[in-house]
Image: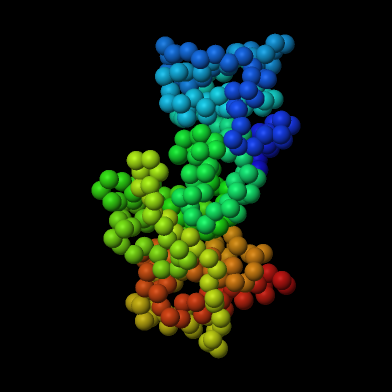
Amino acid sequence: MNPVEKMAARVLSRHRLRPPYDLESLVSEYGQIEYHSFPINADGITVGIGGETKPSILINTQLPVTRQKFTLAHELGHIIIPWHTGTVVSHIDSILADLEYREMESEANQFASELLIPQLWLLEIKEDFNSIEGFINRVLVDTGVSRDAVLIKIFNVLDIPIVCAHVDIFGQVEKVYRTKSAPNGANLIGKNPFAEKIFSTYKTEEEFSLGDRDYKAWVFDNLDVKETDDRPWRDILNQILSETASESLLQSVNATMASRYNSNKGKSETEICSRIIQSYDGVKKFEKIAAHPLFSQYVIKRVRELNIRNKI
């Protein structure tokens, strides 16, 4: 957690709260809440932060209910974060040029996200579910937050390798959510995941809807990688590249290997090998290479060499 998220976590701990809880009741302890239809383009306004009396928090009723709730938590962030003072006119999706203002709004958004969807709570309740749809729906119901806010937070927090694609009305991927340990989903944009095979190393896949949106998700697990080839990894890689006519990708293959190893070193050999192999999965230029029967041998030999080097 960053410092702002820790502030939100401390507020919840102090009041012994976890979702679902009464946000208005919580915020009322820190400020006077009023709801108005704004004549200006703003989500909320907080007046008198850092003063001797409770600040006044104004929420724009022209917003959807889920956004009003996030704005209320956002305004509490402005009150709690010590260096936010005075009067703040909030634009949650601010793209204004003023860097200081953008940073304040970003901090208040981080605070609101943690207040409404606590990380520790997410990690706790994920153990109760065996489907992505069920988990996401539980979070949506218990927090009352928008679909996008929930998806962003879930995929920033979970440590399970998952890729989730939002599919538009034409059956094409419009947006991709992924956990940090999951394969890169950038190549999914524009593809039809219901008609095309996207990944080959996933453990399970799931199709579901959230409201009026359709999704497809893939969950990845550790792979069973065993060393069966006595040759050095360079010889194995050269054979793979030669047999797939991919010699031009030598540097790219090795760069991806090094990058993924560095982001996973410290984990078990099985986890490292699995995350590396999965990082090539779904990437079109690596399609033939990753499908080669010797690819796992290149990976495990390279990982073992890097592990030895890092211990010296």
Judge by depth and name the residue closer to the eye, 146 or 261.
146
Q: Residue at x 45, y 18 (%)?
A: 61
Using the image, determine if residue 149 lies above or below residue 124. above
Using the image, determine if residue 123 lies above or below residue 110. below
Q: Is residue 283 left or right of residue 233?
A: left
Q: Residue at x 48, y 13 (%)?
A: 36
Judge by depth and name the residue closer to the eye, 140 or 79.
140
Q: Residue at x 63, y 44 (%)?
A: 121
Q: Is residue 114 visible?
A: no
- Residue 200 at x, y = what percent? 41, 68
Q: Going by the picture, which residue comes out furthest to the left?
A: 170
Q: Quadrant of the N terminus?
A: top right
Q: Is residue 134 left or right of residue 268?
A: left
Q: Is residue 282 visible?
A: yes
Q: Residue at x 60, y 48 (%)?
A: 125
- Residue 104 at x, y = what percent? 58, 27
Colour mode?
rainbow
Q: Is residue 90 left or right of residue 293?
A: right
Report which quarter residue 33 is drawn in.
top right
Judge by depth and name the residue closer to the eye, 198 or 298.
198
Q: Is residue 35 left or right of residue 284?
A: right
Q: Total of numbered circles in the picture?
A: 0
- Residue 92 at x, y = what percent? 49, 28
- Residue 239 at x, y = what percent? 42, 83
Report which quarter residue 87 is drawn in.
top right
Using the image, determine if residue 111 lies above or below residue 312. above
